[in-house]
Structure formats: structure tokens, C-alpha cells
Image: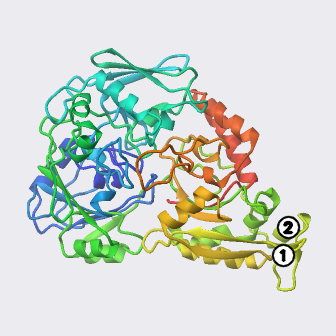
Amino acid sequence: GRMPLHHALSACPRHLQYTHAGIGRISAGALGPVLSCRRNSSRVVADDCRHRRNDRTRGVYPADRLEKLESKMDFVKSGTDPATLVLGYNGRIDQFTRSPLRPRGRASAMRWIFNSLLRWDEQANLVGDLASRWERSTDGRTLTFRLRPEAVWHDGRPVTADDVVFTAALLKRPNAYFRNTLHLSTGEPAEFRAIDRHTVEVSTPRPYAALPAYLTGTWASLFLIMPRHVVERVGEAGLEAHPVGSGPFRFGEITDDGHAVLPAHEAYFGGRPKLDRAVLRLFARNDDRIEAFRRGELDVVIAPGRKFGQEEAARYHGRLEAMPSNQIVQFALNGRHPILKSVKVRQAIATAVDREKLVREIEGPAGIPAYGPVGPTNWAHEANVERHAYDPAKSRRLLAEEDWQPGADGVLQRRGERLAFSVVFVPDTWNVDYAGYAEAIRLYLAAVGIELTVKPVEYWTGMKTAWRDHDFGAFMYYDTFYNEPDLYWSWHSSMPKRPEGPPADVPAGLPQYGYGVTGYNNPKVDELIIAARETVDQARRKAILSEVQKILATEVASYWLFNYP
């Protein structure tokens, strides 16, 4: 089949899953051409999403000496050693996850080392990973997985059903970071049972439509199977120090300069990778990483940023590619805020801003305005929602209905209170122009008498604490749901909180995922979201989710800005 560029760039060996986008993989045979390419072939640059999945993805790859892979993209290896792939990542080695039990801010490399029960293919369908086949019972409460008998750990021991049950037990513990995905919204856990050496049964007291999506290695769950015999021998710290998985590459070493070396897994169940090793080079600054690419030190750069355009790609004998996305950037409003809890005020904000013009001017023709929480590439997308067209007169009328009257300085007031709030965001110099959006929205709102204060903050000390303490009027960030539109994590009023436990740099008590920090609360939406979770039939589930999207859009639960194309 044809594979989106994103997957090929970040998934070189067969069945290597990358975490964030449509989550596809590439076959071992596809890497045959990699080994035969010339040293002076040009480089590849890809732009993938950060957390969350399905970003606008760009890739620069050679315009000459290309050899066709089994996917839509042409890829060459062009390093000193043609059997080594050198990838450039932003971040430090201590930010990279090496164990599913101790997640950190970046988990991309985990898919090189570990496997999950299921994975997303290049069409964003769920298919088997360690499971060669799987089925759901007619009542929707039981999933049965048949494991690949040829799958072995990096130490040569076979992967068994006991390893899956053992992994699930660890990931369901009270302090496990992603424990909530393995529980129903009412708290009952999914029960894992080994039927025989290669068969696993997963049962829930009620249907849980989204559960298969959480038995993957995406950041939504990080359900990566661990070897029981290793964890019991060396402990959790030992597994993190020297990960042992079943994936196409093994953990080799961390070099003195903080890079990771991953040798090929000779006995990988999908076939030995055609690369001998992958090297993950890490950069604290994106500019330094791009310079390393320009000097010819990197074969792949993940997410070079919006400033890396087609013209520069051509300068390095490459070209830029893009692929569809499920990531949505939002101007998210605090439903607990004394002013913004009013639906009419939120609707007034929406009609005060010319969303289409704003997105077009900042993103260019590639930007797709967003009107709800489910993107247009997803099967559950509902296009027929209230879009709150740009209408400043309507905005003023809605505010007047809420008793907001012009003050002496032009800012609306009500009983001595100014119609004013702030927006927080993390400045982003290379991916999303949050500052540009914030300033433009400030000007739009000022025109109807709303005072918006723009407050750039640091992520850990600013954004995270604002979320935890609900200390914001609005914030700008992106939301993403892979290809599983389980709106529970972002829009159900009782969304569970993060547990105490790793990683230490993430405050406990925050909502586990998504935009639950907005405090949006609608009992009807809560009811529909749970109904959708417990409906296995996709057509019926889509009808329920369509109703949810219509309500969220009408009430401006958030002000969605744009989908990555």
C-alpha cells in the first residue's frame, strides 16, 4: 500500500511504529534501496507532530539518485556508513522515554525498541503488531488476541501471553502514568488473562469501544509490552537503564555526547532490518539541529519547523512533502472563569474573530480552519456544526444581552467589572506561531470591547501550573487524538486526574489528557460521550459523536483555530 511520508521518515525498519501521526509502518524490504545508495546522495527532512499526533508533516528528500520504496516517498541513506541511519531530534537524552513504566516528555524512540499488541497502519486503521490477529465478542466486552509465535525478546527468549498480562498489571497500578486508559470511566479495570502461551483475553464489564486504540504504543497509552523475566530480575530502574524489548532495534548505548545508538534486532519477527543501526542525535536548539543537517551530519530531521520551506529544501537537493493530520490548534477558554463560563460571551468571542482570514494569513493556503474537536480526516468528523461566522455586530449584541456596556476607555464593563482576561501560551519559534495568533485575536477582541492580555509563559513553570491551578482565561495549545475520537479525555466533566508517580516533572492532579483543564461542563455532553464509549458499532457511535460535536461547537466549548492539513 501507499504510506504517508511521515511514517517512512520515522519508521525505517519493518513494523517500526512512530508515535504521533497516522501511525504507519514500513516493510523491511522497503529498506533494501537504503543500503545501495551513494554517499553523496542528499538528505531527508521530515516535519512530524509533537504529541499528539497527526501534525502537518513535511519531508525534504533527494531530487536525484532516488530509489523507489514500497511507499509514496523516495528515501536514501547518505551517511559515512550506508548501513547506519542518523536521525536528528530536538531535546536532551534525559527527556527521552526508555521504559513504558517511566514515561518522559518524548517517547518516539520507544517504537524502535518495543512492540504493542496493536498498531495503526498507514491508512490509520488498527492492525496487529505482536498480535497476529484479534477479534471482539458480539457483546463488545471481550477482546481476544493471538500473539505471533515467532516474536522473541532482544535476549532471545520468546514473547508470551504472560508478558502481556504482566505488562497490563504494571500499567494499571495506581501511580502508572497512563493507567486511566485501561479503566472504564467508572473506574473498573480491563482484565487481562492468558488463555494459553500465545492467546490473551481482555474483558471489561461493559463495552469499551476505544480500548483497542489504547493497546497501541501511542502517547495516549504507551501500551508497550515488557519482558516479565527481565523486569522481575532487574527491576523498573534496571529496565530503564538498559531496555529490553521485542522491536526491530535493540538498545545499544548512550554515547558520551548524549546520543543513542540502536543496533538492529537480528531475530525481529518482521524480518531483520536492512539497516545495521540507527543513531538518534539530540539537540537542545532546533537551529543547531538544522545546521547539522545542512552540514551533512544527519540523514533525517524530525520536525524541522515552519521556517524550513520548499526553497531551502531545493537548495539541499531535496523537496518538501506534506501529509494529512488530526492535530487541532485551539484558543481554549476556561469554563470556570467568572466571565467565560457564559455561553453567550464565548459565542461573542467566536463571532468577533475572522477565523478564516486569520488562519489564511498565518498558515497560508495549507491552513484548514477548525470548527470542532474532530478533524476532517477522521471517520467521526461532523462537518455540519455551527461555525460562528465573523460578525462583530452580532458579537456586540450578544455581549449587550449579558449586560456588558461600554466603559470610558472602550472596554466593556458590568457592575464595575471589566470584560478582560488573559491568554497564556508557550512561544514557539519554529512550529506554531502562537504569538501571532494571540496578538491578532487581541486586536479582533479589542474592536468589540474585550480586553485580552497576551502572556507568553514557559511550559513547565507557566503553562503546567496555569492548568493545574485553573489560573488562566484562555490558553493556546494543540489537541490531538490519533485516529480514535474518544472525546472523554478532553470534554467529559469528570475526566480523571493524573496519578502521583512518574514522570516527576509532570505535576499530579492535572487532567490526564487533553483539554479537560478548560472545565467545560455539560451533563448532556457527558451522557453522550459515555454512550459513544460504550457503543461498538461505528455507524451508531458516529451518530452519537456527531451530536456531541454540534453541541460543543454551538456552545464554543473551545475556540478551535485550525487543523494541520
Q: Position of residue 560 (x, y in %)?
A: 63, 59
Report x, y in % for residue 124.
Answer: 43, 42
Q: Which residue is mark 1?
A: 412
The type of residue carrying mark 2 is: Leu
Q: Position of residue 246 (x, y in %)?
A: 23, 36
The image quarter in which residue 330 lies: bottom right
Does the rendering let one see residue 369? no
Foreground residue among 273 and 220: 220
Side of 91 relative to 359 (left or right): left
Label drawn at residue 399: 2
In the image, residue 149 sits, relative to residue 29, either above or below, namely above
**Crowdedness of circle 2 by 10 Å Cα count: few (<14), some, many (20+)?**
many
In the image shown, does 211 or 184 lie closer to the viewer? 184
Q: Earlier in the sequence, mark 1 or mark 2?
A: 2
Which residue corresponds to the image point at 63% horizontal and 77% vertical from the top-left? Answer: 440
Residue drawn at x 65%, y 41% is 494
